[in-house]
């Protein structure tokens, strides 16, 4: 028996990055896992990593689906029930900062709708579609938010930041509603993590590396000096999915960001140097 033996877990957005690392960690702990995303080849990579981590082939359910599509959501839920008979954990991880070349208040309403559809509405829909099954198992929901939810502003991508702020408040509201039925809801708020996120908005590998090494080198960006790995966030998601280890945490968003959000711009500079003290 391992930590999640006999538990049925759905991890959305598990064809890459944080979701993939989370699916692999659940596999290592013996869970039955539904992995899902739009890209079948990337899902196959995740599956192979899960097998390497010790998963039995029958404990992996692969669903190619667009999460912004109601029919895709239904297939994720129904195939999990058909294969594993129940749902114990829902990880709402899929998300993106969709980029169409515009920034700030120039971003269109069409972009606003696409961003909210994926990062917020799809989570709401997945919660509604799994709720009765999670109540039966007294299960867990973990949402993947972001430190861009605030209180600091992200003026260049206001809709992405606002979609995550909405997700944080939704997490709190649903946590109180569902705990009366024994279902626990929390979220994680990653800071900068090296994943497919930048590639998904069209950044080349080279520019991504340049961006990441700049961020790592500036103590006011990432005080810890190291950019996050998907595995850093996966460990937190698995912790919040484990009732034995985190039962008293309800409706929270736990930050994992190498200290980034602790830095205020006012205190980010070396005042000794500037003021000649
Ligand atoms: P990745 O781009 O590596 O992974 C995103 C995942 O979401 C992929 O598996 C992708 O699958 C899936 N996805 C995107 N759009 C859809 C869709 N329409 N339907 C189904 N699946 C979709 O990024 P991360 O791992 O970094 O992102 C995971 C979560 O972490 C997101 O919610 C993101 O907002 C959040 N986050 C990331 C941070 C970072 O710095 N990386 C920081 C803070 C939060 P596919 O392309 O196959 O559809």
Image (cartoon, rainbow, N blue to C red):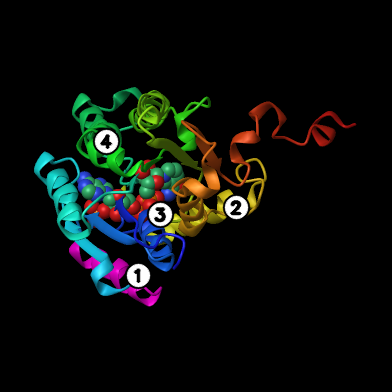
Residue 163 picture location, percent across and down: 34, 30
CB-based contact (under 8 Å), mark 3 and mark 2: no
Q: Which secondary structure, mark 4?
A: helix
Residue for badge 2: 216
Q: Is residue 68 left or right of residue 208?
A: left
Residue for badge 3: 18
Residue 198 visible, this angle: no
Badge number at residue 127: 4
Badge number at residue 50: 1
Most foreground residue, 152 or 94 = 94
Residue at 59% x, 35% y: name it.
261
Q: Which of marks 2 and 1 is nearer the N terminus?
A: 1
Badge number at residue 84: none
CB-based contact (under 8 Å), mark 4 and mark 2: no
Task: Give the CA distance from mark 4 to mark 1.
Answer: 25 Å
Most foreground residue, 249 or 50 = 249
Task: Give the CA distance from mark 2 to mark 1.
Answer: 30 Å
Q: Earlier in the sequence, mark 3 or mark 1?
A: 3
Tell whether position 176 is magenta.
no
In magenta, the rendered stretch is 40-55
Question: Quadrant where the N terminus lies?
Answer: bottom left
Q: Which secondary structure, mark 2?
A: helix
Badge 3 crowding class, 10 Å Cα cut-off, few under 14, some 14 to 19, many 20 or more, is: many
**Magenta residues, dominant SS class:** helix
């Amino acid at each position: 028996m391992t930590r999640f033996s006999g538990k049925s877990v759905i991890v959305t957005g598990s064809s890459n990055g944080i979701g993939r690392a989370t699916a692999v960690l659940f596999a290592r702990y013996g869970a039955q896992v539904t992995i899902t995303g739009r890209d079948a080849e990337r899902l196959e990579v995740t599956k192979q990593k899960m097998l390497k981590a010790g998963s039995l082939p029958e404990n992996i359910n692969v669903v190619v689906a667009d999460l912004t599509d109601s029919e895709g959501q239904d297939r994720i839920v129904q195939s999990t029930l058909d294969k594993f008979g129940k749902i114990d954990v829902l990880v709402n991880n899929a998300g993106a900062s969709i980029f169409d070349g515009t920034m700030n208040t120039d971003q269109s309403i069409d972009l606003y709708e696409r961003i909210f559809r994926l990062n917020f509405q799809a989570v709401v829909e997945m919660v509604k579609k799994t709720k009765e099954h999670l109540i039966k198992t007294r299960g867990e929901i973990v949402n993947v938010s972001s430190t861009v939810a605030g209180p600091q502003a992200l003026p260049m991508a206001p809709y992405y930041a606002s979609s995550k702020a909405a997700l944080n408040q939704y997490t709190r509201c649903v946590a109180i509603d569902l705990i009366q039925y024994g279902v626990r809801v929390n979220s994680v708020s990653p800071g900068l993590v090296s994943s497919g996120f930048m590639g998904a908005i069209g950044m080349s590998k080279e520019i991504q590396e340049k961006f990441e090494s700049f961020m790592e080198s500036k103590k006011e960006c990432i005080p810890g000096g190291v950019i996050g790995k998907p595995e850093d966030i996966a460990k937190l998601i698995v912790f919040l999915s484990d009732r034995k280890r985190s039962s008293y945490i309800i409706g929270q968003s736990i930050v994992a960001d190498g200290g980034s959000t602790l830095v205020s711009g006012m205190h980010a500079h070396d005042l000794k140097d500037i003021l000649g003290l």
